[in-house]
Amino acid sequence: MDLQAFKQRILPVQGRLFRLAQLFLRNREEAEDALQDVLLRLWTNRQQLDTYHSVEALAVQMTKNLCLDRLKSPAHQKMANDAGLKEFEAEGVSPYRQVELADSAGLIRRLVEDLPTQQKLILHLRDVEEYSFEEIEQVTGLSINNIRVILSRARLRLRESYVKANNYEAGH
């Protein structure tokens, strides 16, 4: 694979890979580093890339594995991805509502973080990256029926945890 082919096949998926890395690492700088490592590995192994059915699926798998390795490493210090109120600073939104929205978004992030890795990955690929079931099948190697079940369980678990957390907070 030459430079032109690499640019055409790999660079368009860079945004998706970055968002996936950010999902796992919860830190922009670490996600950028992980993406750079993945791109470097892909470039280093560019001669073998033509043997893969889907280079995008390979890149997603590499990103996921690299992020999981980084999370397991003893040197990794989990930094809180506290975007704070900046996400919701908009004209016309009251400070009270901004705090409420930030709390809700923080809760959702924590709940997604608590999902099993496979559920978190499939939920991200489907609902954030908007992959088709066929694309998720290529990336994960799971059957479409299995993907649907995992996605359904992840959404149900999120919904139940969110309602439970809000009911608990409302009761106190």
Image (cartoon, helix red, strand yellow):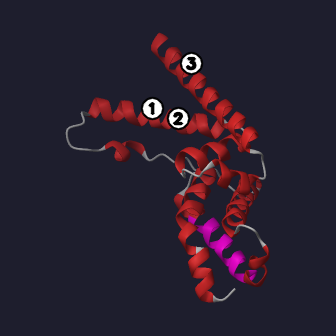
Going from the N terminus, do you reach mark 2 or mark 3 first? 2
Q: Is residue 89 left or right of residue 64?
A: left
Helix, strand or loop at disc 3? helix
Q: Residue at x 24, y 36 (%)?
A: 93
| Residue ID at (59%, 51%) | 23
Gap in angstroms between the C-alphas marked 3 and 1 = 13 Å
Determine whether, in the image, residue 39 is placed left or right of residue 72: left
Residue 70 or residue 141, whichever sits in front: 141
Inspect the image, locate mark 2, and give the three-letter code of the amino acid beneath it. Answer: Ile
Kindly state the secondary structure of the residue where label 2 is placed.
helix
Magenta segment, which residues? 32-45
Rendered image quadrant of residue 7 = bottom right
Looking at the magenta stretch, what is its main secondary structure? helix
Q: Residue at x 59, y 34 (%)?
A: 111
Task: Provide the residue designation for mark 1.
Answer: 104
- Callout 2 crowding tier (Cα within 10 Å): few <14, some 14–19, many ≥20: some
State which tag comes first along the sequence, 3 or 1: 1
Verify CB contact (< 8 Å) between mark 2 and mark 3.
no
Q: Residue at x 48, y 10 (%)?
A: 171
Q: Image quadrant for the N terminus?
A: bottom right
| In the image, residue 65 above or below residue 89 | below
In magenta segment, residue 48? no
Q: Which residue type carries mark 3?
A: Lys
Q: Circle 2 is placed at which residue position?
A: 108
Residue of label 3 = 164
- Around disc 1, counting alpha carbons within 10 Å, would you say few (fewer than 14), some (14 to 19), or many (20 or more)? some
Label 1 element class: helix
Vertical side of 64 occupied by 164: above or below:
above
Which of the two residues, 47 or 74, is positioned nearer the viewer here?
Answer: 47
Residue 71 placement (x, y as % from top left): 71, 53
Instruction: Evaluate whether residue 148 shows in this view.
Output: yes
